[in-house]
Amino acid sequence: GAVVSQHPSRVICKSGTSVKIECRSLDFQATTMFWYRQFPKQSLMLMATSNEGSKATYEQGVEKDKFLINHASLTLSTLTVTSAHPEDSSFYICSATGRLETQYFGPGTRLLVL
Amino acid sequence: AQSVTQLDSHVSVSEGTPVLLRCNYSSSYSPSLFWYVQHPNKGLQLLLKYTSAATLVKGINGFEAEFKKSETSFHLTKPSAHMSDAAEYFCVVSTLKAAGNKLTFGGGTRVLVKP
């Protein structure tokens, strides 16, 4: 149980385009989902917290207009990187939590912006 | 505020020998503590968690960790390392009341297992 999927697993896009990443909880209802960013050989950095049906809460320094987060249902959250630039290239990981405290992580999405 | 310090950025062990990954935390509230493992280009897998029950926590793949409040530590151990244990390990703290279930990650410890 407690499986979280992400799609796509990797994506390459041109600078200036937008990319959408999906995060799904497959076998439980996720009241809260989190989006993290991980640079090579570094730890995870929390970008934002989203609760189903409400606006996401962004961490300090994360641009809301650049990283659009939507949590439309209890099993799906999306992260859209708008007008992507090479510096947005990174490994993006989502996690989901239900009633219990434990966060379950997706397999990650590697974004490369050319 | 909460923070996590993993004392070793890299640990190298021989296959079949014990593994010790050190973690210290600070938290204003009673913490929940987790160890996650990340294999290359993969997401994070939960190894074990402490949530104010037994101080010695057993996890998957033979790992265990002991919560020591007096030392504010939550070190991860395994009696005998396997080649498949080579990965990045993250110690994580969460204080539900204070931070709305936000996780704070340590810097990570990369484990190398030599044959």
Image (cartoon, helix red, strand yellow):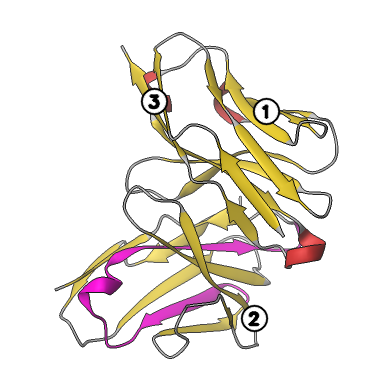
User: Which three-letter amino acid code belongs to the residue tagged 2?
Assistant: Glu
Residue mark closest to the camera, 3 vs 1: 1
Extent of the magenta region: A74-100
Q: Nearer the viewer, residue A18 or B26?
A: B26
Badge 3 crowding class, 10 Å Cα cut-off, few under 14, some 14 to 19, many 20 or more, is few
Callout 1: chain: B
Q: Residue at x 17, y 82 (%)?
A: A15
* Dot 3: element: helix
User: Which three-letter amino acid code belongs to the residue tagged 3?
Assistant: Ser
Q: Position of residue A8 (x, y in %)?
A: 32, 67
Position of B31 with respect to B108 (left or right) is right
Tell which residue pokes out farthest to the bottom in this image.
Answer: A65
Q: Quadrant of residue A74?
A: bottom right
Q: Position of residue B97 (x, y in %)?
A: 82, 63
Above or below, B55 against B18 in this view is below
* Dot 1: element: strand
Badge 2 crowding class, 10 Å Cα cut-off, few under 14, some 14 to 19, many 20 or more, is some
In primary-sequence order, the first of circles 3 and 1 is 1
Q: Quadrant of the C terminus of chain B?
A: top left
Residue for badge 1: B65
Above or below, A28 against B63 in this view is below
Is B34 contained in the magenta span?
no
Q: Which mark is residue A52?
A: 2
Q: Nearer the viewer, residue B94 or A3?
A: B94
Q: Quadrant of residue B83?
A: top left
Instruction: Report how far apart the C-alphas of labels 2 and 1 lie in the structure.
Output: 34 Å
Residue for badge 3: B84
* Dot 2: element: loop
Q: Are marks 3 and 1 on the same chain?
A: yes
